Amino acid sequence: MAPERLGVCDAHDHLFLRSPQLPGQELDSAQAAADELAAFHAAGGRSVVQWTPHGMGRQAGRLPELSGAAGVHVVAATGLHQAVHYGPESLERLRAEGLAGVFVRELTEGIGRCGVRAGLIKVAGGFHGLDAHARWTMAAAAEAHRATGAPIAVHLELGTAALDVLDLLCGEWDVPPHRVILGHLNRSPDLAVHRKAAETGAFLAFDGPSRAHHATDWRMPDAVRSLADAGFGDRLLLGGDTTTAGARSVRGGPGMPHLLRGVRSRLQLALGEGVGAELTERMLTVNAGRAFAVEW
Ligand SMILES: [Zn+2]
């Protein structure tokens, strides 16, 4: 799909997600996924980039039908989350199989046997640092990026360790910074770190809200304005990041439509009328198209 056809894009979200860390809150209902996509479409949304990685209940085979029914493009992910989201046996199996090979296969041949290919590699950092698991998954992500050109999207734990991630991926393993998307910067409103990360050329995703992190939500518009004022408006992305069943709009939470109703208007308020409308539109369309574009 040509990047300019993405339309209004939620750059980080989830239709399906399952983790031992979120018991009872699994995103595993195809009907709820369909309803949430329809609600997003009604709010003006046309594309969703899912950051659910390998082994977390992606249900990739269902995505084409859901996408077609809602009229919303859906991008799937490969990659691996933090170790706490997996059993030790599955990590052992991936280690034996070779993680980079798994990522490349999911990007080029498909996820499982359903034929749906991933469009990005999602990995995760730790809280203010990178442990051995993070280094292992990021090494594999860099290798899979070199083989395919796919972008690497990084869950930053509570928004921290952004510069450690860039040092590792771009400094040690030569991934071009503009192929790295840093997620959850809204959860750590450290403007100096944001600016330093933006200076490298990486994409910065402001993706939430989350009930657990609402204390930082109100700082997000100022963080975006500060980056835009410094000339980095071309590398900012917006996402919803719905990770629990109760956070879906169809279950009474903010869900995907909140990005286009709540977040967009709040940003426009912070950025000023004309500029705000232009920049938020760019973040939701052109920037997302550039961040996720790949010459397959
Ligand atoms: Zn996420």
Image: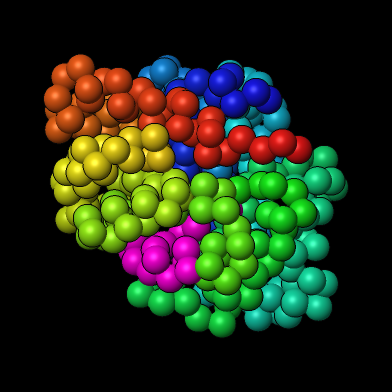
Q: Name the residue located 41 percent from the left edge and 40 percent from the top edge.
A: 235
On the picture, is 91 further left or further right than 223? right
Q: Which corner quadrant holds the C terminus?
A: top right
Res 272 visible: yes
Which x, y percent locates residue 200? Answer: 42, 54
Query: Relative to 75, is 54 above or below?
Result: below
Of the pair 131 and 192, the residue shown nearer to us: 192
On the picture, is 170 further left or further right than 140? left
Which x, y percent locates residue 252? Answer: 32, 37
Q: Name the residue located 65 percent from the left edge and 62 percent from the top edge.
A: 142
Numbered-mark total: 0
On the picture, is 15 further left or further right than 110? left
Which x, y percent locates residue 11? Answer: 47, 38
Which x, y percent locates residue 153? Answer: 53, 52
Q: Name the residue located 14 percent from the left edge and 25 percent from the top edge.
A: 272
Q: Name the residue located 37 percent from the left edge and 40 percent from the top edge.
A: 236
Q: Which corner quadrant holds the N terminus?
A: top right
- Residue 159: name its quadrant: bottom left
Q: Which residues are magenta?
A: 152-167
Res 114 visible: no
Query: Relative to 199, is 295 above or below?
Result: above
**Is residue 4 one of those drawn in magenta?**
no
